[in-house]
Structures are given as C-alpha cells and as structure tokens.
C-alpha cells in the first residue's frame, strides 16, 4: 500500500480537528451507555438487554481511546463502522418499520448511524495512524 504525500501544516491541523470531532461523540455515547444502561435497554428494546448496552458502551470507549492514542485506531474505526451497521439493522430498521413517532426517530437514528459508519470508514482509510492490523480484504 502506498502512502499519500505528507499533508501540509494546514491540512494536518484540519485532519487533527476532524479526528477529534469524529471520535469525541463516541466517547460521550460510550459513557452514556454505561451510566444509563438499564434505561436504554428498556427504551429501545436492545438485543441482549442491559448486557448489550454495556458491551456497546465499552466498545465505543475503547475505540475512542484507540483513536486518541493512535494505537490500533484503524481496526477500532472499522469495528465502529460495523457496530453502527449492527445498530441500524437490529435497532433502527425494526423501529422505523413500526411507524409512529418512535419510527420517525428511528429513521433519524438510521441516517445518523449511517453517517457515523461512513466517517469511521473514511477515518480508517485516510487518517488512521496505526495500520498494523488491516484486514486483507481492504
């Protein structure tokens, strides 16, 4: 794999800001999942219940840490993209199909998590610093 030419100082600053803007919400969401696990599990009919909420919260916090530290950040971003797609398929689509106000909110969640999955894939492709564990199909 060839690496692109080093970015200009201005581009490096934009990339640094983008990295922080991308990953910080995952850290906040991870903390929210841990502190409000039972409420989230009940409110959204989460598969695996409270355990599922706690596991996804831990996953988001670990990914946040990986990106902040630049260690295993490519792998973390790829796994975040998978997590967002799991949310879409297991939570948002069924709730959207149910309709009503909850269905409308699920459609918003679908687009939000689609954007976050896309951002995670772009991060993995262009901004990740630790690329040791890159799947061979990428």
Image (cartoon, grey):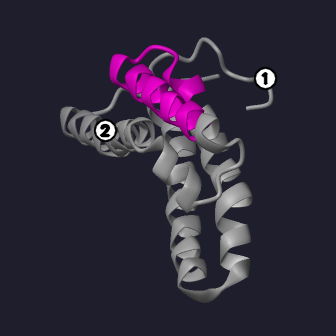
Label 2 belongs to which residue?
A: 15
Residue furthest bottom as drawn: 100
Which residue in the rendered view is the most extreme toward the right? 137
Q: Residue at x 53, y 85 (%)?
A: 101
Residue 35 appearing in the image? yes
Residue 119 visible in the picture? no
Quarter where residue 75 is shown: top right
* The image quarter in which residue 132 lies: top right
Residue at image position (39%, 22%) is 65
Q: Residue at left 36%, top 26%?
A: 6
Quick check: 5 above or below 110? Answer: above
Q: Position of residue 109 (x, y in %)?
A: 53, 66
SS class, disc 2: helix
Horizontally, residue 135 falls left or right of residue 109, namely: right
Region of the chain picked out in magenta, as a range? 53-78
The 10 Å Cα crowd at callout 2, few under 14, some 14 to 19, many 20 or more, is some
Judged left or right of residue 20, residue 54 is right
Give how far across and how far down residue 110 sits, in percent.
59, 66
Depth order, front residue of 99/3: 99
For disc 1, the marked residue is: 136
Query: Residue visible at 30% across and 45% down?
Result: 21
Mark 2 to mark 1 CA distance (whole Å): 25 Å
Up/down of 117 relative to 62, above or below? below
């Amino acid at each position: 794999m060839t690496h692109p030419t080093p970015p200009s100082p201005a581009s490096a600053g934009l990339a640094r800001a983008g990295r922080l803007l991308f990953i910080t919400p995952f850290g906040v969401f991870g903390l929210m999942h841990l502190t409000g696990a039972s409420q989230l599990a009940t409110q959204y009919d989460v598969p695996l219940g409270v355990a599922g909420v706690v596991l996804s919260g831990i996953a988001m916090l670990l990914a946040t840490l990986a990106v902040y530290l630049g260690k295993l950040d490519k792998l973390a971003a790829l796994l975040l993209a998978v997590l967002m797609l799991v949310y879409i398929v297991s939570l948002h689509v069924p709730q959207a199909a149910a309709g009503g106000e909850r269905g409308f909110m699920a459609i918003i969640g679908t687009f939000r998590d689609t954007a976050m999955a896309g951002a995670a894939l772009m991060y993995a492709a262009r901004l990740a610093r630790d690329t040791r564990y890159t799947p061979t199909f990428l």
